[in-house]
Amino acid sequence: MNVIYVFLTMDTRKIVKAGPSSHTVSLPKKWLVKHKLGKGSTVVLIEQGAGVIITPDPNELKPVLREKTISVDKKGLDTIGRELASAYMNNYSTISFAGDDVQESAKELRKLLRDFAGLEIVEQGGKKLVAQDLLNLKEVSIDKTLRRMDMTIRSMFEDSIAGVSSEGIALRDYDINRMFFLVARLVRGSLQDSALAAHFGMTNGQLFESWRFAHALEGVADGLKNAVSLGLKQNDVCKSIDALYRDAVKAYFANDAALADVVAKKRDIKLVVAKTPAQTELNAQFRRILDEISTIALIVIDNS
């Protein structure tokens, strides 16, 4: 998974009295040029803790269209997939695969693109495959996407307990991956673009915690998919983990630190003693899910 780092630059300015009831602060020329601002432009002021964030008015900004070309020759699909994920996370509007191996790898490249919401193939030739980002980030809700991830995981638990085939669970895990990358993209974009952050009305801390929560949900889904693929037969254990998961998510959305503490205390659910390698691996997947559930509880406790 991609880890998000944020680097901040510091610049001090003096407050100047401009009239009986107003003061002004000069803005750095480099920042004005970067955002194409000048006389008559409007900016937005956002209070954050004891400070104020100054950002260009998102209603005046024109989208910056950027293109990324990924060479596919002599590369494994894992490497190409990582480069594609990086381009997606960095909000490139057009992503192209280029090289002599494009035609031979077209089917696999199309499968890679399905992991990323909004990317649609608009051109394909002998040595080129072009995908365009058709998603408007401002029309996506981080909160609603997180809730969709939760509902999908709940259905995965229900079907796992009911004995639905591993293929059906794997398809849901695929959906979770798409939503995780989308949340990560929204969070990264907001941390890099204060105007986008202003649109969502979230502080950097809230954005980071949203990413932590999405990462934990993705881990729960992965662990559950792997457990089912091993032939999950322990419905009682799975039911107990499902109940704990639901309480953890309830605590997150309600910001209920007391409930989160109860979840953290109950994380050591008793597992069946492993007598075979398959049981050992199954227990490892259960523990992974419990670790992610514990992380969700800690997110709530950390913010209390």
Image (cartoon, rainbow, N blue to C red):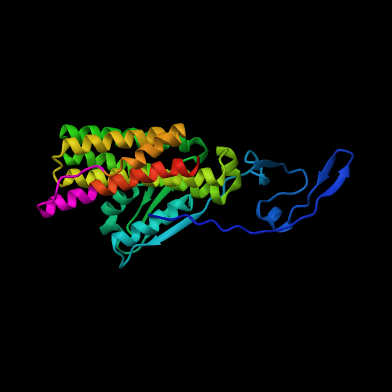
In this rendering, does residue 114 appear at all? no
Number of on-image labels: 0
Residue 181 image position (x, y, % from top left): 40, 47
Q: In this view, does 157 lie above or below 285?
A: above
Q: In the image, 95: left or right of 22?
A: left
Quadrant in the rendering for residue 256? top left
Residue 267 or 104: which is nearer the viewer?
267
Quarter holding the N terminus?
Answer: bottom left
Magenta span contains residue 284: yes
Q: In the image, 66: left or right of 151?
A: right
Q: Residue at x 20, y 49 (%)?
A: 283
Q: In this view, does 239 lie above or below 7?
A: above
Q: Which residue is drawn at 45% across and 31% down?
A: 254
Q: Which residue is drawn at 15% across and 39% down?
A: 234
Residue 304 image position (x, y, % from top left): 50, 40
Residue 253 image position (x, y, % from top left): 44, 33
Q: Hey, which residue is sitting farthest bottom in the picture?
A: 74
Residue 47 image position (x, y, % from top left): 66, 41
Magenta span contains residue 183: no
**Numbered range of the magenta stretch:** 269-285
Q: In the image, 93: left or right of 236?
A: right
Quadrant in the rendering for residue 183? top left
Q: Hey, which residue is sitting farthest right in the picture?
A: 20
